[in-house]
Amino acid sequence: MSSGQIHHSPSRQIHNPVLPGFHPDPSILRVGAEYFLATSTFEWYPGVPVHRSTDLVNWEPIGHVLDRPDLLDLRGVADSAGVWAPSLSYHDGRFWLVYTIVRTVGSPYKDVDNYLITAPSIEGPWSEPVFLNSSGFDPSLFHDEDGRTWLLNMHWDHRDGHPSFAGILLQEYDSHKKALIGQPRTILTHDELIEGPNIYRRDGWYYLMLAEGGTGWNHGILMARSRELTGPYELDPQGSLLTTRDVPDWPLQKAGHGELVETPDGEWYLVHLASRPVQTPDGPRCVLGRESCLQRVTWTDDGWLRLAHGDNRPQVEVPAPTGVEPGPVVAPAVRDDFDTPALGVEWSTLRVPADDSWLSLTERPGWLRLRGRQSLHSRFDQSLVARRLTSVHCEATTAVGFRPSHFSQLAGLICWYDTTTHYYLRITHAEGRGRVLGITVTDDGRYHEIPDAGIDIDAWPQVHLRACFDGAELRFSASPDGSVWQRIGPVLDATKLSDDYGDRLRFTGAFVGVCAQDLGGTRTEADFDFFELRDLP
């Protein structure tokens, strides 16, 4: 794998988003001089990427927490289900992570399980999961000064005529028994949707941070406080600490769902999610999904939290902590030549881990070999590897060696949102023609092949494929030699690869990558020489 070089940035500003592309539900933690930031992954595998920083400006990916089958089983989970809202903490010399696995979405029910794992280091090894409860999602842990540990999560109510968000639950966790003890207590209800609870203790107060309004255009962060852990909690009289619901032209939209961190010098920062929309005739759409941002916050004399710049709107440029040397910058990998025995940290697979049964980087050194498996509509065994889009102005290029002998064998370049919405520049076989290249589209669940987009490529020695994202537009092209390119098909609507398109609940973001299918079950091989994803001006 070719990666970027490490250098030091003189920047003393935090530029948002600090984690561009699909990095929702951020959880932040400081241990000593290092900060760690974990995010949701939904149906993507491995689960829960972690980034590290020493200055809150520059962030380095260091791997994933849920990277073993015993920690994460996602076969069959619905689109936008899977791993929701992980939350990190540090207690008794160990890292703790609680997370939700959601099995059902888009119905009155949320079949969820909440788990806890711990490790002596952020790199692991992580313990076997401890089951906690199934009453709702967005769990977090609060380790109180008396040594007791408490679990919080929102409570889900599926019944007609009842608010789906039935309040915030609190229950004690016994680390010796590895189980919750006592009865759960509802410590706060609210007329608005509330989730993502986190508790902080400061100056004799327990502060409850909440995500409010649902994770869309009405999103925000609300604070409450109490002198007692179990309440009663009073809401911040100012209302939302952070929101963009009243400023539709603001560059960072959908701002909400956050956590707090204190620097060694006593400065406070809020990590939160936000989205950067692309404007379309049908309204704004957020192709990159929900991204992670940071804001500086301060405490008022009367003990409430406020954004340091004076209002409740997220800023793109934020002052970095004072007195801290700039941390190393790890430039994202632009080109992967597949010359290492394992996939780089930037790659993800759908629902199942990459293993030798369908993916190899060693059988043909310098190439990524995929064995075709199930269709792009499958929620079980897809042979697909992809990277997050981090810009809506970018270009993805690959070269593939693939000789299908049947129309049920396909391989190529995929621009992906989920199983219901994607664009596929694919090679397959046509009777009497040999290899052909064309585009298939799944548009909010409706499949079709673009007419007049196919070309005969049987004589091409190798097939180079390219996808160019330019704001709301997506264009495919192909080349037999990587030098002379020809357009394939029409201009496509890239904004359909977003949370804001279609009739289903969607929570992820756009990916681009490579894949292979063999619908006859013979696992025909497709070999990819390289993959390049570079930003355009």
Image (cartoon, grey):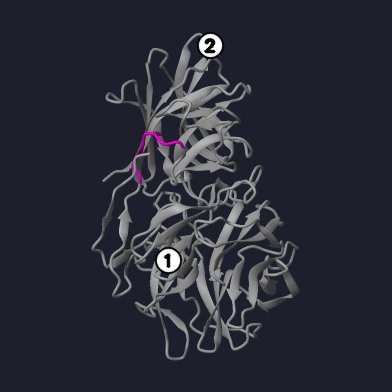
Residue count near mark 2 (Cα–Cα under 10 Å), binned few <14, some 14–19, many ≥20: few
Residue behind mark 2? 431
The stretch of residues the image draws in magenta is 333-341
* Residue type at the position of mark 1: Tyr
Residue placed furthest toward the top: 432
> Does 292 lie within the magenta span?
no
Q: Residue at x 59, y 80 (%)?
A: 144
Q: Position of residue 463 (x, y in %)?
A: 39, 22
In the figure, 408 relative to 385: above or below?
above
Under circle 2, the secondary element is: loop
Earlier in the chain: of badge 2 and badge 1, it is 1
Under circle 1, the secondary element is: strand
* Residue type at the position of mark 2: Glu
Q: Main secondary structure of the magenta part?
A: loop
Q: Residue at x 29, y 48 (%)?
A: 5
- Are the residues tagged 2 and 1 within 8 Å (C-beta)? no
Q: Is residue 130 left or right of residue 68?
A: right
Between marks 2 and 1 in the image, the one whose residue lies nearer the viewer: 1
Q: Which image quadrant: the N terminus? A: top left
Q: Position of residue 516 (x, y in %)?
A: 52, 29
Viewer-proximal residue among 168 and 144: 144
Can residue 284 be spotted in the picture? no
Residue behind mark 1? 35
Viewer-proximal residue among 154 and 170: 170
Residue 344 bears which disc, if any? none
Q: Position of residue 381 (x, y in %)?
A: 61, 35
